[in-house]
Image (cartoon, rainbow, N blue to C red):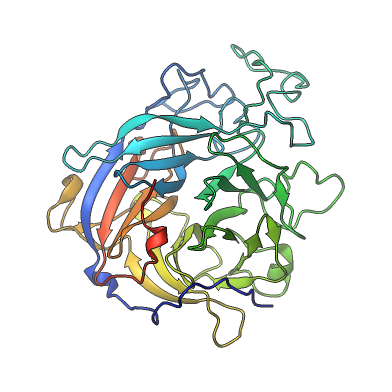
Amino acid sequence: MPIALVSTARAAAPTSPDPSDATLVGWSMLPTQTYVPGSASSGHWTTGNAAVPAPYPGQPVQGFSGTHALADGSYLVMSDNGFGAKANSADFELAVHRVRPAGETGVTSYEGLAFNLSDPDRHIPWPIWRDGGCTSAASLPAGYACPSRDRILTGWDFDPESMQIAADGTFWFGEEFGPYLLHTNDQGELLQPPVPTPGVMSPSNPTLGGATPNLANSKGYEGLAIAPNGRVLHPMLEGSTAEDKAAGLDADLRIYTVVSGVFENGFLRYRMESAANALGDFIMINGHQALVIERDNLQGSTAAFKRIYLVDLSDEDGDGYVEKTLLVDLMNVRNPDRLGGFGEVFTFPYVTIEDVEIVDAQTIAVMNDNNFPAVGGRGADVPDVNEYLEIRLAAPLKVDRRLLPSG
């Protein structure tokens, strides 16, 4: 059944900007091999590649799966679980960083580690890697020793893919192993046990036991939107559940409503243009409108579908589905100033484009997860970087001012 949205003053009817008028007005990139200064080595369970061999000399700042714009022009960026899976990411420390795009130089500067995610008060009721998991492992790779039991969370514990800051300054993270919602203070320390999704479990869920999972791995909360009041969350699955697939709804993604950490009954549905597509990100722009990145799973010369939709969650026709309008085709963005050294038509052909943020009413920021140390977005042997785009829309959005950059 449709969810009941918490509304503020209702915005005007959805605007319909012409996607062909979207213009690149800012471009910057963070180099592939950007590591947290003084951090522990990583990648002991991976082989890397010829361009970036493993293990790595530190903790990669790596691909961004969640972001939050700050008033001074910098961004908080959240790295995901590390190297793509639970089994190979035990030495990747979950983190939020601060970066500053610099259009005049084309290089994004790394301003430092904001915090690591951790569980000092032992809210997690199962072993985590840095407190029981490592010491129980049957074997460890050469050159790696178990760290101290400091309760820092790693990519063995969770796979965070989305992030929002609540009105009280605490952080919420959507992750994929559960899928769970994680609630932390502004230092990344868990404030409560992981919040499970009612009736949904992935194969990586640590409480699965003998139950049958009904959501594929890496199809959890890629999107996590927050209402303008900063108190209501809308987590969105990246993939369809087994029940929805059995009902012929394999292109449908569920959007939930969570108030004070409690899931409300029911959900809305977002229908992808193809069941083979995936969610990249999902953010609110006012009380009922949102932005969604929908993408294919291709890259480089084969990439074809990388889009941002303007979505209306009002469900005025009562069919349980959000309405969507194409806002930006990321494979066809005007670039009259040839920013980044690209041509007059800019394309963004990375496989995982996972961040969209509001800069102002007519400008959005977009970033990719570079899946460190992946190659292929800009060339078969070219290490993928983290690119930052600013895109000017054809017309302003109805943005609630409380969702503009702050803090």
Does residue 100 appear left or right of residue 9 in this picture? left
Give the residue furthest to the bottom. 317
Name the quadrant of the C terminus: top left
Residue sitting at x 29%, y 51%: 389
Residue 370 shows up from this direction: no
From the viewer's side, name the closer residue of 325 and 396.
Answer: 396
From the viewer's side, name the closer residue of 145 and 68.
Answer: 68
* Quarter of the rendering containing residue 128: top right
Q: Is residue 51 above or below residue 67?
A: above
Give the residue furthest to the right. 210
Does residue 195 appear left or right of residue 226 in this picture? right
Does residue 228 appear left or right of residue 28 in this picture? right
Name the quadrant of the N terminus: bottom right
* Quarter of the rendering containing residue 84: top right
Q: Is residue 394 above or below residue 111?
A: below
Q: Is residue 210 above or below residue 150?
A: below
Residue sitting at x 33%, y 78%: 16
Give the residue furthest to the left. 337
- Residue 161 point in image, percent of width and height: 54, 47
How many numbered marks have been drawn onto this rendered protein structure?
A: 0
Does residue 59 appear left or right of residue 160 in this picture? left
Q: Is residue 157 above or below residue 230?
A: above
* Quarter of the rendering containing residue 403: bottom left
- Residue 200 point in image, percent of width and height: 74, 58
- Residue 360 point in image, percent of width and height: 30, 60
Residue sitting at x 59%, y 54%: 221
Residue sitting at x 29%, y 39%: 29
- Residue 208 point in image, percent of width and height: 81, 46
Residue 172 shows up from this direction: yes
